[in-house]
Image (cartoon, helix red, strand yellow):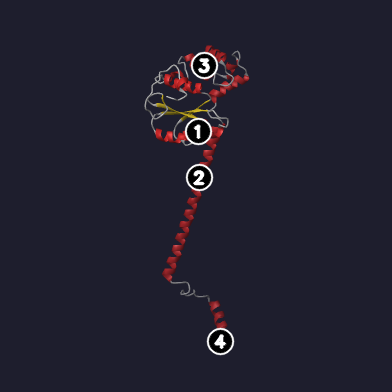
Amino acid sequence: RTNPLLECIRNVNKEFGDIIPDFQLGRTTCALFLSLKYHRLHPEYIHHRIQKLGTMYNLRILLLICDISEHQDPIRELTKVCLINNITIIVCWSKEEAGTYLATYKAFEHKPPDLIKERVDKEYSAMLRSALTSINKVNKMDVETLRTSFGSFAKIAHADPEQLRSLPGFGQVKVRRVVDAFDKPFRNKATSALSSMQTRIQAENQDEQETIASELSSADLNVEYTGSQSRQVHQFGSAADMHPPPAPAGSRCTCSRSKSTMEY
């Protein structure tokens, strides 16, 4: 009852009850109130309040009053705390602003989100205008010119550049933009670079796999060749045990003469 924000909450009914947060703005919405001046004196206060709040309520708000000059570091610290604990932080510069936030949340408790949604007209002319004005250099007057000249979006998409140049207000640059919008693929430089990077990575991976396969194949051949050699050694004995092949006749005579000379 001594909260200084109570006097600044207007146009909504207020009730007092035994609740964990400072303000309950609906069945699934609550708010904690904190002053930076008080946080500088008692930095552990907000941590105890958040811990006590736990995972109650879907939307949890930390309403922060900025009443000190050196506020950058405390706000940065509290923002990290709110991100970790899934809490929405709102920084206010006065009590009246904070009271307006609380009253607005309470007033829109049962309101649908249609007020903040983008209003898209479902009429054909509005949809055609929205689609064609997304092309650079094309304005609403150009859209009306295209619609009255061709009649439908399909005919505009298949129009020749000569037909577009004959329209009033369509110069060479605007005609090229319209033709490119329908003829060129829907890719910009970023997506093209990403696609080329993915292709290059796939090619490098394929080359690496082929290199590994060739290395494994050569290793298998070496193992098979070594195994055949070992089978030969086991079959015929070691190389020292094997008798040399018979020499030719000329060599035998030379060897015998050499032997006789050595014996002599």
Alpha-carbon span between mark 1 and mark 3: 53 Å
Q: Residues within 10 Å of mark 4 (few under 14, many from 20)?
A: few
Q: Which residue is mark 3?
A: 129
Q: Amino acid at mark 1?
A: His
Ranked by sequence position, the earlier of labels 4 and 1 is 1
Q: Which residue is mark 1?
A: 39
Alpha-carbon span between mark 3 and mark 2: 47 Å
Q: Residues within 10 Å of mark 2 (few under 14, many from 20)?
A: few
Q: Which residue is mark 2?
A: 205
- The image quadrant where one finds the N terminus is top left
Ranked by sequence position, the earlier of labels 1 and 3 is 1
Residue 98 in percent (x, y) is at 49, 23
Q: Which residue is mark 4?
A: 263
Q: Residues within 10 Å of mark 3 (few under 14, many from 20)?
A: some
| Residue at x 48%, y 35% (from the top left corner) | 81
| Residue at x 47%, y 23% (from the top left corner) | 5
Residue nearer the viewer, 179 or 251: 179
Alpha-carbon span between mark 1 and mark 2: 55 Å
* Helix, strand or loop for disc 2: helix
Residue nearer the viewer, 29 or 63: 63
Residue 150 in percent (x, y) is at 52, 14
| Residue at x 49%, y 52% (from the top left corner) | 214
* Helix, strand or loop for disc 4: helix
Foreground: disc 3 or disc 4 = 3
